[in-house]
């Protein structure tokens, strides 16, 4: 008797999504945007008087989602500041300087500059001797956000500063202090809910545009630029979404054309959500092709994962794993009928992606791509065997396999090949052999966040023990304690990822996308299973705010 995932039909009315027209998809809007861009460049380059003003503008540009228009200017300003600080053995010795120091620290680290946590030594001493006096919430928020840029050796940042700033913010939010504006209160609540460093960038843009507009001293040109740019970027996202959506009379719509959701009724039908993941990973309009390919990868991952978790017998899953390992299209008849189309779609899509890369980048990546699917299926098979044989792994044994079964290593090797202008064979090999620690960290965050949200449904349906349950089984902890442990492990993994991102010999854009994948998984699973039950876990609302609501 076959199981079902009890997945609901897609909550989206594909016909209305396909009917969207966007008046921002035209040259006139782009010209207006470019005039505003010039104006802001001038302000950034020549008009601002102090470094703090420059830093605050850079922060606003990033949070408003328009910093990619000013990359060179931002790099120059930060390089200058970094250079000055190195010369003057800079330290934050007054509480009044805390906002500026913490902001500079966060921005420098975020852009890969070296800056030691020792700049906060005086503050750390004050915290430890209980002589820190300032009640300035703006500085505390900035300090709190800076503390999330810690890497694994920065004990002062995450053992002293972060708990202190968190506590201060909690006290403030729970107090009746009404001498602060509503805006500051909103910012404190937002920061406590999730630090900026962990947030999905595009949704943060949506939130920050609204928050920035409430500023009494906001810059009108900046506001206008942020809104018009948001709408222009949204217009290109809408067109990409149409490509992957099912549409009766346009056979170019990919998901419909595969026929997978008709043939395999037990799999998730979530093409909109699959696309949404990728806007979290790279949002810039020029990467539309990368987002399309990655949406295809996500849809294939979800389909094959459901076959292993829900529908297939162990014998069938072994056949499928061997088929992917051999990558042999001539043996389709060895598979059960329901698996044939799925294998063939996988085979054709991956070879098609490889063929395009060979055409345009003159390198054959197919051996690497197919190995990533073979490794993924092996990891799925391990979990299926554990479940069907009632084996209960330790948390460490589970994690060794479960970071691969997230699909993150497979996903990221496709991203690397499609996204990079020049493909390095050394990097391909290191990704293929699972030697890139930053990838492991990103996958670990996804696995843990996914387990926190999806394991109740998975275990009720019947599945291998997930991280929460492995920990409970191994230590005798309660479910609540196990969840706290897993949350802590997510936080520790971020410390490690910050370090690995800094030392990785990988293109910066790829590293940023890898970290964005961790951010996206925290976003998807923040309110429950945002991928399996999108309407219940805020995903639907978020998709609307990014793809449908104009400014
Ligand atoms: C790997 C997962 C999925 C959701 C899809 C996410 C993508 C494609 C990035 C398959 F996270 O969820 P699920 O909870 O079924 O994964 P699992 O590995 O726990 O079966
Ligand atoms: Mn699953
Ligand atoms: Mn699975
Ligand atoms: Mn899961």
Image (cartoon, rainbow, N blue to C red):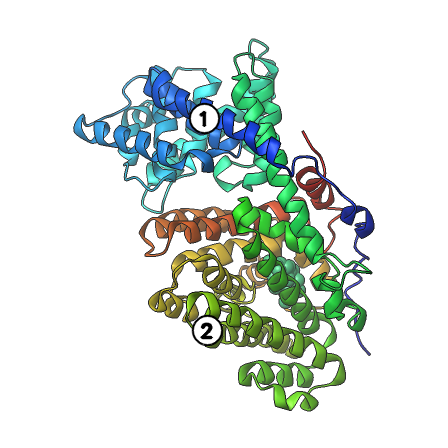
Residue 202 as seen in the image, left or right of residue 314: left
Name the front one of labels 1 and 2.
Answer: 1
Regarding residue 485, the answer to whether it shows in the image is: no
Let me know if residue 312 appears in the view: yes
Q: Nearer the viewer, residue 88 or 12?
A: 12
For residue 413, side relative to residue 291 (left or right): left
Q: Secondary structure at mark 2?
A: helix
Quarter-of-image position of residue 185: top right
Kindly check if marks 1 and 2 are in contact, taking CB atoms under 8 A apart as contact: no
Q: Quadrant of the N terminus?
A: bottom right
Instruction: Specify whether tag 2 is near ligand 1 (CB below 8 Å).
Output: no
Mark number displayed over residue 368: 2
* Residue 55 in the figure: left or right of residue 286: left
Q: Residue at x 59, y 81 (%)?
A: 321
Q: Position of residue 26 (x, y in %)?
A: 63, 37
Return the x and y of residue 395 as percentages of the image width and height.
52, 63
Which circle's residue, 1 or 2, is located before the other in the chain? 1
In the picture shown, does residue 72 fall above or below 141?
A: below
The one nearer the camera, 174 or 248, is 248
Q: Secondary structure at mark 1?
A: helix
How crowded pointer 2 is (Cα within 10 Å; few <14, some 14-19, many 20+) is rated as many
Picture quadrant where residue 113 is located: top left
Query: In percent of the image, x 54 and y 56: which residue is there?
Result: 290
Q: Is residue 290 above or below residue 65?
A: below
Which residue is the site of mark 1? Answer: 38
Residue 154 in the image: state x and y as whole percent. 33, 41
């Amino acid at each position: 008797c076959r199981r079902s995932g009890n997945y609901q039909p897609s909550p989206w009315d594909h016909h209305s999504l396909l009917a969207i027209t966007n008046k921002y998809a035209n040259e006139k809007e782009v010209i207006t945007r470019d005039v505003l861009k010039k104006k802001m460049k001038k302000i950034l380059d020549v008009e601002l008087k102090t470094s703090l003003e420059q830093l605050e503008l850079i922060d606003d540009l990033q949070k408003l989602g328009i910093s990619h228009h000013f990359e060179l200017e931002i790099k120059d300003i930060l390089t200058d500041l970094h250079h000055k600080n190195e010369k003057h053995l800079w330290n934050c010795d007054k509480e009044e300087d805390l906002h500026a120091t913490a902001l500079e620290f966060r921005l420098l680290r975020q852009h890969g500059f070296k800056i030691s946590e020792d700049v906060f030594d005086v503050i750390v001493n004050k915290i430890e001797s209980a002589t820190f006096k300032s009640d300035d919430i703006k500085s505390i928020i900035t300090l709190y956000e800076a503390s999330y840029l810690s890497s694994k050796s920065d004990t002062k940042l995450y053992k002293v500063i972060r708990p202190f700033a968190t506590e201060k913010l909690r006290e403030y939010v729970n107090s009746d202090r009404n001498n602060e504006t509503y805006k500051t209160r909103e910012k404190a609540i937002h920061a406590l809910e999730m630090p900026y460093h962990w947030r999905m960038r595009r949704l943060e843009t949506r939130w920050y545009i609204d928050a920035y507009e409430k500023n009494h001293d906001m810059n009108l040109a900046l506001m206008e630029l942020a809104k018009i740019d948001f709408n222009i970027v949204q217009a290109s996202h809408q067109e990409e979404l149409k490509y992957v959506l099912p549409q009766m009379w346009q056979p170019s719509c990919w998901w419909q054309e595969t026929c997978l959701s008709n043939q395999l009724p037990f799999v998730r039908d979530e093409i909109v959500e699959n696309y949404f993941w990728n806007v979290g990973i790279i949002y810039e309009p020029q990467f539309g092709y990368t987002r399309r390919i990655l949406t295809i990868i996500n849809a294939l991952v979800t389909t094959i994962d459901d076959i292993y978790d829900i529908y297939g017998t162990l014998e069938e899953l072994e056949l499928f794993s061997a088929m992917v390992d051999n990558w042999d299209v001539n043996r389709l008849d060895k598979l059960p009928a329901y698996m044939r189309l799925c294998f063939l779609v996988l085979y054709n899509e991956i070879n098609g992606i490889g063929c395009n890369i060979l055409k345009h980048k003159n390198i054959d990546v197919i051996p690497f791509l197919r190995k990533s699917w073979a490794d993924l299926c092996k990891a799925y098979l391990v979990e299926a065997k554990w479940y069907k044989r009632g084996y209960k792994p330790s948390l460490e044994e589970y994690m060794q396999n479960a970071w691969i079964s997230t699909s993150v290593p497979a996903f990221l090797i496709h991203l690397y090949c499609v996204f990079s202008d020049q493909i390095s064979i050394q990097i391909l090999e290191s990704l293929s052999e699972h030697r890139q620690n930053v990838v492991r960290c990103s996958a670990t965050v996804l696995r843990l966040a996914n387990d926190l949200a999806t394991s109740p449904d998975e275990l009720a349906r019947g599945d291998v023990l997930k991280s929460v349950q492995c920990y409970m089984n191994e230590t005798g902890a309660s479910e609540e304690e196990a969840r706290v442990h897993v949350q802590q492990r997510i936080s520790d993994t971020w410390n490690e990822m910050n370090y690995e991102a800094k030392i990785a010999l990988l293109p910066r854009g790829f590293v940023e996308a890898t970290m964005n994948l961790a951010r996206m998984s925290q976003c998807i699973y923040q309110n429950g299973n945002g991928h399996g039950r999108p309407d219940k876990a805020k995903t639907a609302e978020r998709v609307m705010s990014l793809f449908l609501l104009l400014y």
